[in-house]
């Protein structure tokens, strides 16, 4: 039985929501938080005793490379990207000594239905932990734009 949980949330760089809308070309963040095991609760289900797993904390995303692109990891986290051979998928392995870390992506392609950012595995000190990954991403197109340009001309 796994006692610890990793909670993943999607966020634009300024807000968090259950469904995060972004436009093609915009950046968004994925925050991973390792939650402690709850070993005792009170009558209202509030935790009275918890146990936090030791780090390092490692999680691996596997996602379509044409949909999103890895941009960077926040301080304290390291990320290693590899392409999945003979596949349109990429894998991003994130390692952190902190139970909370953030990685940033850029939306590359509009989609019609919301998707999760799949996590293949998550560990704390090498032990598997459960994953809660309920937030979704919806990438919309950039709006068509009329751009007005003023130019200097020479008169004859």
Image (tube, grey):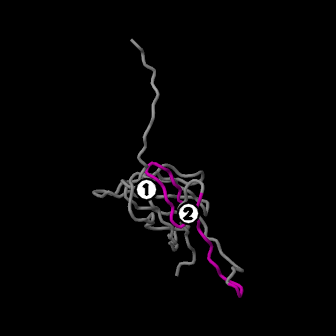
Q: Is residue 35 magenta?
A: yes
SS label for mark 2? strand
Which residue, as the protein is rendered here, is positioned at the far top? 156
Viewer-closest of 149 and 64: 149
Question: In the depicted view, which residue is nearer to us: 95 or 72?
Answer: 72
**Residue behind mark 2:** 32
What residue is at 38 percent from the left and 59 percent from the top? 111
Label disc, if present, on residue 140 of the rendered structure? 1
Discs 1/2, front = 1
Q: Is residue 51 magenta?
A: no
- Residue drawn at x 62%, y 76% as measured from the top left: 37
Q: Main secondary structure of the magenta part?
A: strand
What residue sits 52% from the left and 82% below the top?
A: 1
Determine the secondary structure under disc 1.
Answer: strand
Question: Residue 132: where, in percent of width, then height?
Answer: 52, 72
Where residue 151 sits, quadrant-wise, is top left
Which residues, given as a range, are shown in magenta? Answer: 15-44
**Label 1 packing within 10 angstroms: few (<14), some (14-19), many (20+):** many
Which picture quadrant has residue 112? bottom left
């Amino acid at each position: 039985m796994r006692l610890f949980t990793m909670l993943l949330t999607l966020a634009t760089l300024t807000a968090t929501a259950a469904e995060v809308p972004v436009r093609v070309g915009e950046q968004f963040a994925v925050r991973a938080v390792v939650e402690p095991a709850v070993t005792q609760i009170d009558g209202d289900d509030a935790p009275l005793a918890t146990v936090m797993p030791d780090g390092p904390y490692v999680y691996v995303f596997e996602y379509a490379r044409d949909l999103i692109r890895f941009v960077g990891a926040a301080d304290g986290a390291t990320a290693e990207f590899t392409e999945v051979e003979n596949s349109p998928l990429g894998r991003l392995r994130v390692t952190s000594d902190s139970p909370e870390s953030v990685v940033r992506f850029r939306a590359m392609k509009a989609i019609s239905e919301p998707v999760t950012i799949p996590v293949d595995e998550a560990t704390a000190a090498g032990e598997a932990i459960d994953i809660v990954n309920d937030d979704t991403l919806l990438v919309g197109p950039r709006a068509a734009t009329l751009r007005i340009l003023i130019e200097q001309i020479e008169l004859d």
